[in-house]
Image: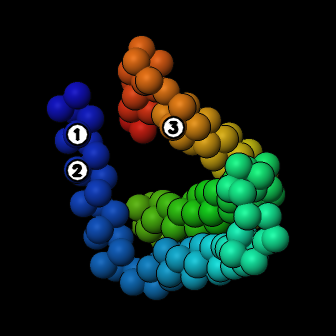
Amino acid sequence: MFERLGKGTRLANQCWRVVQKDRELLIFPAISTVLVTLLACITFFPVLSDYLFSPVSDPAMRAGRPGYLSLAALYVAVYLVTVFFNSAMIASALIRFRGGDPTVRDGLNAAVARLPYIVAWALFASFVGLFLAAMERCSRGLLGIISDILGAAWAVA
C-alpha cells in the first residue's frame, strides 16, 4: 500500500512539473469546467421549471417524471466530458514525458483517436456510479455495509 502511495506521489509531482512547463495544458480542465457548467444549466433549468410550474401538486405523482432520466443523462454526459478532457491532458503529459513539446491540438487529437474507448469507459463508469448511488440510497443494515464496501472498492479502482 505504501509503495502505491509513493508511486502516486511521484506521479503527482511529475504531473505538476509538466503543468509548470506547459501552462497551456490547463486549458483542458478549463474547457471541461465550462462544458460541465453548460450541461448542468441545459439539464437543470428544464427540470426545475417542470418541477416548479407543473400542474401536478403531489410529489409522489412526480416521481416517475423524466427529471430523473435527465439527471442520469447529465451524469453520463458530465462523465464523458470529464474523461475526454482528462484523456487529452494525459496524452499531452505523456508527450512531455517522452521529451516532446505537446500542444493543445496534440492532446485533443489523441483523445479523439480514442473516443470509442472514452465513450465506453464513461458509460460504464457512470452507470457503476449511478448503481452505487442508488444502492447506497436504498440500503440499510447488511446491504448498507456491502454498498459501502463496493463504493470504496470502486473508488480505489
Numbered disc 2: secondary structure: helix
Q: Which of disc 3 and disc 2 is earlier in sequence?
A: 2
Residue occupied by mark 2: 9
**Is the C-beta separation of discs 1 and 2 under 8 Å?**
yes
23 vs 38, nearest the viewer: 38
Type of amino acid at the residue the image marks with label 3: Arg
Residue 10 seen: yes
For label 2, the crowd category at 10 Å Cα-Cα, with few meaning under 14, some 14 to 19 and many 20 or more, is few
Residue at left 82%, top 71%? 55
The image quadrant where one finds the C terminus is top left
Question: Alpha-carbon distance for marks 1 and 2?
Answer: 6 Å
Residue beneath the point at 17% across and 32% down: 2
Q: Nearer the viewer, residue 140 or 96?
A: 140
Q: Pick whichever, 100 or 69, lies toward us.
A: 69
Q: Position of residue 14 (x, y in %)?
A: 29, 60
130 horizontally vs 112: left or right: left
